[in-house]
Amino acid sequence: MPDPAGSSAGYFMSPIILTDVDPTWRVAREEVFGPVLVVIPWRRRAEVVAMANDSHYGLAAYVWCRDIGMALRTAHAIDSGWVQVNRGLGQLPGLTYGGFKESGLGAECSSEAAIAAYTRIKTVTVGL
């Protein structure tokens, strides 16, 4: 077990995998910002998409699948600001990052959508 600096003060948590989690549990419904993997058994794609969308949050989602067509249909059906398919790495340069629903405020990073999120547009018309 690692013992990094600050762990005795409560600033460190070892990675954990929670198996057979019920979709109604708080850990399955909220954004957990820590090294936590929640495993929920499912049988049909529609069922897992419904579980993913049954949340007040939508920051990021991950789809792992051998069938790329099914993976892309699933990614489009999930109500999340960022969906990664068959990858778990960080954000790529130039791509917008922002959540849906109660996750975050607008979009960030170097895209037109991110610039628009920080822009107040005003129109003034004058009759002369």
Image (cartoon, rainbow, N blue to C red):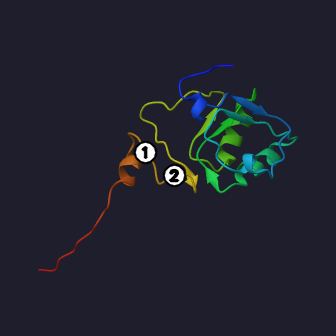
Residue to which mark 2 is pinned: 104
Residue at x 22% of width, y 74% of height: 125
Residue 30 position, x and y percent, is 68, 50
Q: Quadrant of the N terminus?
A: top right
Q: Are marks 2 and 1 in contact (CB under 8 Å)?
A: yes
Residue at x 69% of width, y 54% of height: 55
Is 8 situated above or below 79? above
Camera-side residue: 88 or 74? 88
Is 90 situated above or below 50? above
Q: Quadrant of residue 75?
A: top right
Say what amino acid the circle numbered 2 marks. Answer: Gly
- Seen as rendered, the residue at the extreme right is 43
Residue to which mark 1 is pinned: 108
Is 81 situated above or below 128? above
**Count of numbered tags:** 2
Q: Secondary structure at mark 2?
A: loop
